[in-house]
Image: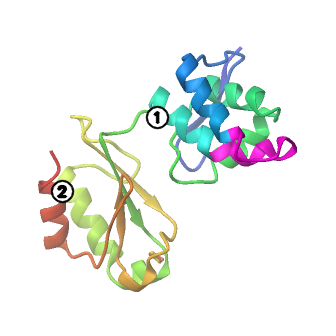
Amino acid sequence: MATTVPTDFTNQVLYTDEVAEFSPEVIEEMKSHLKKYPPERKRSALIPLLFIVQRERGYIDAPGINFVAKFLDLTVTDVWETATFYSMFHFRPIGKYHIQICKTLSCKIMGEPEITNHICKKLGIKPGETTPDGKFTLSMVECLGSCGTAPVMQIGFDYYENLTPEKVDQILDSLE
Ligand code: FES
């Protein structure tokens, strides 16, 4: 029976016996990652595989976790504990653009609260929420590793640095 357990990051961890299925092409792509590591170290392919699951299923879900656990001979807990550690993985559908604002010290000192308030007001959402049109999801994350150009946010795989409210407006307005 499926049960839900709240977490402090992206809402819920769903446990199920269902195992995700992927196309032969995707399985081959996963196997190509295994070839990069010695057989006894195939766990090293965990993060690349999680990225593939997220791409294929839209987000990391319990059946996807179960698949990766079987594929790498790991426990489901092994996979969940890695997946939930990283802010680049999400566990429910998110918007087309995932805005991740750094909330750590340098960014906090250099104006993160003003940036966050500005984005919340502009988009009408709070951190953890998605705009009704499904365009933007807003998350607060720990240090993005670009402290020298604080305040910083990441949208998708792109970094935006030395942010000001005006710069944020330009960035968000340019996204289709
Ligand atoms: S504190 Fe924001 S990037 Fe490091």
Q: Is residue 158 above or below residue 167?
A: above
Where disc 2 sits, the SS reads helix
**Magenta stretch encompasses residue 20:** no
Report, in whole angstroms, how far the alpha carbon at label 2 lies from the one at label 1.
23 Å
Q: Quadrant of residue 163?
A: bottom left
| Left or right of 40 on screen, residue 2 | left
* Residue 160, label in figure: none
Is residue 6 in view from this perspective?
no
**Magenta stretch encompasses residue 42:** yes
* Residue 172, label in figure: 2
Q: Which residue type carries mark 1? A: Arg
Q: Quadrant of residue 28?
A: top right
Where disc 1 sits, the SS reads helix
Residue lying at 77% horizontally and 44% vertically, measured from the top left: 43
Q: Position of residue 30 (x, y in %)?
A: 62, 33
Front-most of residues 135 and 64: 64
Q: Which residue type carries mark 2? A: Leu
Q: Is residue 1 above or below residue 53?
A: above
Residue lying at 53% horizontally and 54% vertically, measured from the top left: 87
Residue lying at 41% horizontally and 79% vertically, measured from the top left: 108
The part of the chain drawn in magenta is 34-47
Q: Position of residue 73 (x, y in %)?
A: 82, 32
Q: Main secondary structure of the magenta part?
A: helix
Front of the two marks 2 and 1: 1
Residue receiving disc 1? 55
Q: Quadrant of residue 162?
A: bottom left
